[in-house]
Amino acid sequence: MLTYWLHQLSIPIPSGESIRTEQLLAALFDHLQNEPVLFILDNFENFLSADSKAGMYRRDFLEVEHLLERLVSSHQRGTLILTSREQPLTLVRLANHQVMDVLPIEGLAPPDAVQLLQQCQLTGTNEELITLAARYSGNPLALKIVAETINELFLGDLQAFLQEEQTLFVDDIRHVLDQQFARLSPPEKDILLWLAIEREAVTPQQVWDNLIQPPSRNHFYEALRSLQRRFLLETDEHAKRFTGQLAVHLSMQTVVLEYVTEYFVIAISQELLAGTFDLFYRFLLVKAQAPDYVRQLQRRLLVQPLLRLLQAQWGKQWFEQRLQSLLSALKNQSEQVPGYAAANLLHLMLETKIDLSTQDFSHLAIWQADLRRASLRYLNLAHADLKNSVFADHFGSVTAVAFSPDNRLLAAGTSDGNVHLWRMSDGQLAGICRGNGRWVWSLAFSPDGQMLTSGHADKAVRLRDISDIYTTAMSHLLTAILLKTFSGHEDAVFAVSFSPDGKLIASGSGDGTMRLWHVGEGTLLQTLAEHRSGILSLAFHPQQQDRYETPTWLLASGGRDGIIYLWQIPFSITEPIVGWRQLTHHRDEVTSVSFCPDGSYLLSGSADHTVQLWSLAREKAERVFTDAADSILSVTCGNDMVAAAGNGGVIYLWHVHSGQLLLSLSGHTGAIGAIALTTDGHTLASGSFDQSLRIWDLRQGQSIRTHHSNRNEVQATALQPAERLFFSCSNDGTLVSWRLYPPHTAADNALIHAPLISLKPALLTNQQTGKIYALEFHPDEPYLICAGEDGFIHFWSVTDEIQCTEKFAGDVGTLLSLAISPDGKWLAAGSINAKVILCPFRHRRVSYL
């Protein structure tokens, strides 16, 4: 190389039989004392070793390091531009030298990438071109190669190319990545494989925690630094989810991520086809504790492609038998070393819907298995190590949610009467407030987070001490201490709220009254009865009010009468209520109220499908949000965003001031009865009648954690003796008809434990959307009437063929009950919104509300 440079610069080359490198360098630097020269060394990684750590030179190029040091340290007029996919250790050591700059080359900015693609004769919308550029991280060479491929193989159809599930690797790009990957040490490969599994930026500690047999800390961090020098690893400092603590996060460029993903899937398939368990044992296909959207990506990009490869080799008819053989081989290993192989096998079986009831996973390490939606009946897990595996919870519909003031705990009240408290840091259940089986309708934390109050369907308000739950060990589940039960309401308590100083609890009930309770003394202070019907929501203003002679708290209440009352509650518990005002703009019941954090606005949601933002200074609705298609059941307000949800199962988020719909979040399959925001406005919790609690990252617009219930109770039954038909419906929306058969002989009746009747399923259907809550047979005609979560009344013919023949909308939200008049002429239905509709049976329409 030096000889070539000297020749190009017309510098006399030293003569002699054995020319030393030092002589050539001396000749070069003598010339550079007088003449400026620009040198360019492209693809410098070719000088570096593929067998040692990043940045080390190949043995036959060790003198290149001396060249770089001379260029940096000597006073000369030469300039060197060096490009490399791997940073030489020489430059790392000399990084602070004044005459040297190290510039990481980033991808093109979106406008520049679009311009480059257009120059390559690629046509498409601006959005499609930006998407393509992002998929290849703005790498100019990759974009040029891909543009040529699209024009040749996809006939210029950019949209068809983008519909490919994964990034396509043209041979030129693959060759470069193959070379880089071949140079990696085992710890470096392990780190990249885990980043491909994680699918999002994670901290170094998260990667370390995944490793089955981690190297020493020094070797681990050296591998990270080596990957950075190879430009295969990107780092960024941002806040951790839930805690807000700043930390370094690791990720890969998109094109590298997809390459490593493909490498991983192919390597795993080759292992399993050979009956070995190296990567399959050390790496996960699905990580149970990953965010929801990440697990969905893992299933789509890791599990499903792997299954396609395996089924193509084994054949679908032999696939289950092959997995059984792998399970047997795993159980027969002489040394049972903990790892991920058993969990991976379980995930493959779950994805292909293999019956688990006959499987034996006993005595195995089943780490990070996601079993939330699995039917585990008869699955043998005896003596299994289920570290970090996740199962379904056991609760009913989620009817109330609240975050603790420090965002460390999330409380959820359910229809089984219990309140569950989860740690936000790891998603584990930390504590429980046990009830009496009656629904929990509302929750509120005290301002210091040490107490929790709840409103119940049994007309009571309960106050519990939850302070120990914050400090308990992660392996323990604590039961909160009941401090006080406040009694006096004559109907269900639908709303509770703490005053900002924590001294008062306000409760609102279906009996139309609001009661104020003294927390310390446990006594009733006042009862207010201005609402004409039930109170559904309460909220204290976050700041004290000084508009009256005595300091007061402002309390808002919303009810079934469609009116919002604003109450001035004095600090002094002995003084009467100072005054109240009305806000009347909703056309139906007010189901939820919430103050914005700065106290300038009040937010209200209603069964009239609207959310309204009220200016407290003007006492008028300044903005009405009308995007919701169904009744609103819960609202909450952040610093610059409002959120609402209800019967439609969709969460809406708007900008406070512009009124623009920012986002709509879907995922629940039932009505959403409660939502809550963390104080930083980044995380939202939603509780639904579909028996799930979801945690959403609002910055990404994704569900990151879901707590599912495994309860599937029978909700209603109906019997038609004449046809010997018995119908039942359950939480999963399934309607089952059973044919009734009497005992075969009189001797059967003599058996003490013999059933009077045996049931055999005649029909299984789930044509309705959501849960079915009510069933009734018509007294004279062969019809079964059903109603439930979808708000429709369904008519099933139960003659020769059982089928749904007609349905009509009740237009009052979820229907909970049905009744038919004795003469069969009238049908009544009761809704979750406390409305009753009457319908003539013949006309199939609502006549009275």
Image (cartoon, rainbow, N blue to C red):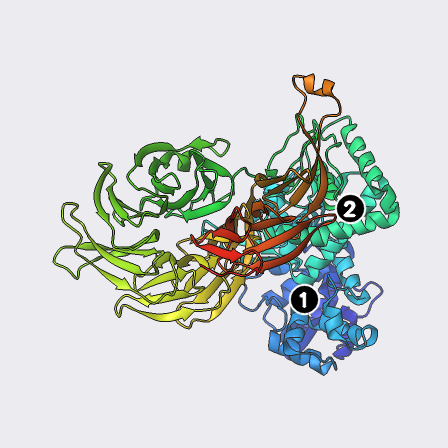
Three-letter code, disc 2: Ile
Work out whether residue 468 or residue 206 is closer to the camera in this orientation and state it. 468
Crowd tier of the residue under label 2, counting other residues whose Cα lies within 10 Å: few below 14, some 14–19, many 20 or above: many
Q: Is residue 667 above or below residue 758?
A: below
Report the residue marked by disc 2.
268
Q: Tag 2 or tag 1, which sits nearer the N-term?
A: 1
**Label 2 residue SS:** helix
Q: Is residue 359 left or right of residue 445?
A: right
Work out whether residue 404 or residue 535 is closer to the camera in this orientation and state it. 535
Report the residue marked by disc 1.
135
Work out whether residue 506 or residue 685 is closer to the camera in this orientation and state it. 506
Residue at image position (65%, 76%) is 113
- The C terminus, quarter of image: bottom left
- The N terminus, quarter of image: bottom right
Q: Is residue 490 above or below residue 473?
A: below
Q: Is residue 125 above or below residue 161?
A: below
Q: Is residue 786 left or right of residue 144?
A: left
Q: CA distance from mark 1 to mark 2?
A: 24 Å
Crowd tier of the residue under label 1, counting other residues whose Cα lies within 10 Å: few below 14, some 14–19, many 20 or above: some
- Res 49 visible: no
Three-letter code, disc 1: Arg
**Residue 727: percent from left, percent from top:** 64, 41
**Label 1 residue SS:** helix
**Residue 831: percent from left, percent from top:** 47, 52
Q: Residue furthest left?
A: 549
Residue at image position (42%, 45%) is 408
- Res 558 visible: yes
Residue 655 image-quadrant placement: bottom left
